[in-house]
Amino acid sequence: MPSKTAKITTAALTLATGLLAAQPAFAETAQAADNDNNQAFTFGVIGDIPYGATEIAKFPSRVQDLNADKDLKFVAHVGDIKNGSSVCSDEYFSYIRAQFDTFTHPLVYTPGDNEWVDCHRTNNGAYNPLERLDKIREVFFNEPGKTLGATMPVKSQENLGLPEDVRFDKNRVAFSVLNVQGSNNSLLPWTGLGKTAPTPEQLAEVEHRTDAVIAQIHQTFADAKRSNDRAVVLMQQADMFDPSLLADATANPATVSGFREIVQTIVDETNDFDAPVYLVNGDSHVFAENQPLAAGSPWLNIYGSAAADNLQRITVDGANNAVDYLRVTVSVNSAKGADVLSWEKVPFSK
């Protein structure tokens, strides 16, 4: 009978032989993954769509246009799946979910204020916005950690009750999708329900969601530094630098008070990150590309923050301007700085 030592030695030799035999295949797999990580790729961004009956009718065609762009690795919808004067009904949410399910690309969606924050309005159905937020999560985020459309795994804040806040990484670019709302981050009173000031439950929701957003921003940058990522891309609905709000915000910074902590967090992390940071948002409906917190910007005084020259803001066309999608290209792994991301508007076919 062989000794115990002999048995162990024989088993070890067998395992080693198996590993050696498998090594070429393993090496090929690793090499393939390496090559994939080094490839340029593209993704699409839409927002504030569909708005109104005409755009709702066109929306299936819009989805098919995005599906036809075979090079897209994913599509992001940065919120507002309806206009601000239509009913926030369960039936409408189900309709949009059915359309989202026709995406052949992974779809990353973050809610906008029109589908929950502003649903207190009489013409929206006079809903409690928090009840509508629960419904949005039930309808669109029933499988936390997975995208809509084609499945792509993402890291979710489901444990904090915010399955819509997700993170993922592609080709050394960190993506972070955040539930940040228009209507001053949901601090405006629910006038449709007869309220003249934010309610305690409203304030509690804003505080919890904002804390979660800030935590995710910190985690995104921490992981990006650890992975030596080449850029960070933040996506959200709210345009915290909406030019139409500039005059009011200059006269009264409280107009945008709901964004102050988030802006400060982005500034701090951007200035501590030796690479570009991109903030992609919807909300204001008109395409824009600028550095909103560059030296000399009026927003520095409004938010009381330091300059953040590496922060690039991109607003996608929406509402009546939603006649195109933004096609973003992420360059090969060797590219750095301003060469990492580039973008173009691609017209829809109808």
Image (spheres, rainbow, N blue to C red):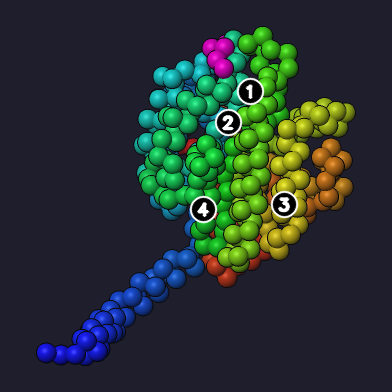
Q: Do the residues labelled 1 and 4 touch (CB within 8 Å)?
A: no
Mark 2 residue type: Gly
Discs 3/1, front: 1
Discs 2/1, front: 1
Estimate the spatial distance between the alpha carbons at disc 4 and disc 2, rounded to whole Å: 20 Å
Q: Name the residue under label 1.
A: 201
| Residue stretch in magenta | 123-128
Query: How far from the left and from the top, in percent, is residue 280?
Result: 62, 44
Residue 25's place in the image compared with 345, above or below, is: below
Estimate the spatial distance between the alpha carbons at disc 3 and disc 4, rounded to whole Å: 20 Å
- Secondary structure at badge 2 equals loop
- Secondary structure at badge 3 equals strand
Determine which quarter of the picture holds residue 254: top right
Q: Mark 2 points at which residue?
A: 112
- Residue 111's disc is none
Estimate the spatial distance between the alpha carbons at disc 3 and disc 2, rounded to whole Å: 22 Å
| Callout 1 crowding tier (Cα within 10 Å): few <14, some 14–19, many ≥20 | few
Query: How far from the left and from the top, in percent, is residue 66?
Result: 44, 42
**Counting residues from the N terminus, which is met first, the one under dot 3 or under dot 2?**
2
Between 309 and 167, the one lying in front of the other is 167
Mark 4 residue type: Phe
**Counting residues from the N terminus, which is met first, the one under dot 2 or under dot 1?**
2
111 relative to 36 in the view: left or right:
right
Q: Which residue is drawn at 83% across and 32% down?
A: 253
Q: Does the magenta stretch include residue 124?
A: yes
Estimate the spatial distance between the alpha carbons at disc 3 and disc 1, rounded to whole Å: 33 Å
Q: Is residue 129 magenta?
A: no
Chief secondary structure of the magenta portion: loop
Estimate the spatial distance between the alpha carbons at disc 2 and disc 1, rounded to whole Å: 19 Å
Q: Name the residue under label 3.
A: 311
Q: Residue at x 41, y 19 (%)?
A: 91
Q: Can residue 273 be seen in this view?
A: yes
